[in-house]
Amino acid sequence: AQSVAQPEDQVNVAEGNPLTVKCTYSVSGNPYLFWYVQYPNRGLQFLLKYITGDNLVKGSYGFEAEFNKSQTSFHLKKPSALVSDSALYFCAVRDMRDSWGKLQFGAGTQVVVTP
Amino acid sequence: DGGITQSPKYLFRKEGQNVTLSCEQNLNHDAMYWYRQDPGQGLRLIYYSQIVNDFQKGDIAEGYSVSREKKESFPLTVTSAQKNPTAFYLCASNLVTAENTEAFFGQGTRLTVV
């Protein structure tokens, strides 16, 4: 079984400050890890993924995430947040052995960036 | 443009009615998925399919049905047996190869029971 925890329902940050959205996961095998962003009444947009290799992954719109195997974490970061980053962020995990490609999602973290 | 198209964007259902949500993709992806999104609960998997004429139940399949008659299409029917159907429904597709493993999502259908 696989699961994802996003411990914060909401993260508030001032524009220009660093943004961090936390994610921890549990999976039987090795993980594929993903971050998606959702704007109101829209589908999910892919931000970045960890498959293998470097633990620091860079993605779209200046976001990056660090895979930490010992802490089973995959926190999303952005050095300087923009008001336009305000959205709902989802972390997802897939077991590398799962040939169906099924994703397990966290509950989501609402990011609010204030001017 | 390549992508996933869901229709309609908004759908209203009366008690006891079956309704069908459309999902079409032109990405040539083998795998397709239906998720349900409720506030504070993230996305939960309803059904998934990897090949034509084959599909599997996800975590919350009760009250839903699907078909996969064409690779490009994966419609979801919300039946009258689904007691709480009001939600945002998202369709996704995926190549499911070793390197190309991110899923692509449609824009969603918001279903409301009236």
Image (spheres, rainbow, N blue to C red):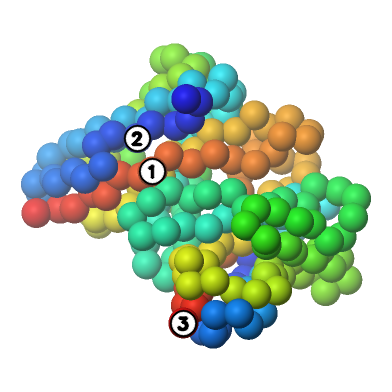
Q: Is label 3 on the same chain as label 1?
A: no
Image quarter for residue B96? top right
Label 3 close to label 1 by CB (< 8 Å): no
For the residues carrying marks 3 and 1, which lies nearer the camera in this image?
3
Q: Which residue is mark 2?
A: B6
Disc on the earlier residue, 2 or 1: 2
Q: Which amino acid is tagged 2?
A: Gln
**Residue visible at 78% across and 44% down?**
A96
For marks 3 and 1, give the CA distance.
26 Å
Mark 2 residue crowding within 10 angstroms, few (<14) / some (14–19) / many (20+): many
Please, which chain is the residue tagged with disc 2 on?
B
Whole-percent x, y for residue B45 in the image? 48, 48
Evaluate whether residue A73 shows in this view. Answer: yes
Q: Secondary structure at mark 1?
A: loop
Same chain, marks 3 and 2? no
Under tag 2, what secondary structure?
strand
Marks 3 and 2 sit apart, C-alpha to C-alpha, by 33 Å
What residue is disc 1 on? Answer: B107
Amino acid on which disc 3 is placed: Thr
Of residues B84 and A64, which is closer to you in this image?
Answer: A64
- Given residues B104 and A16, the one toward you in this image is A16
Q: Are marks 2 and 1 in contact (CB under 8 Å)?
A: yes
Q: Amino acid at mark 1?
A: Gln
User: Badge 3 is on which residue?
Assistant: A114
The vertical placement of B62 against B23, above or below, is below
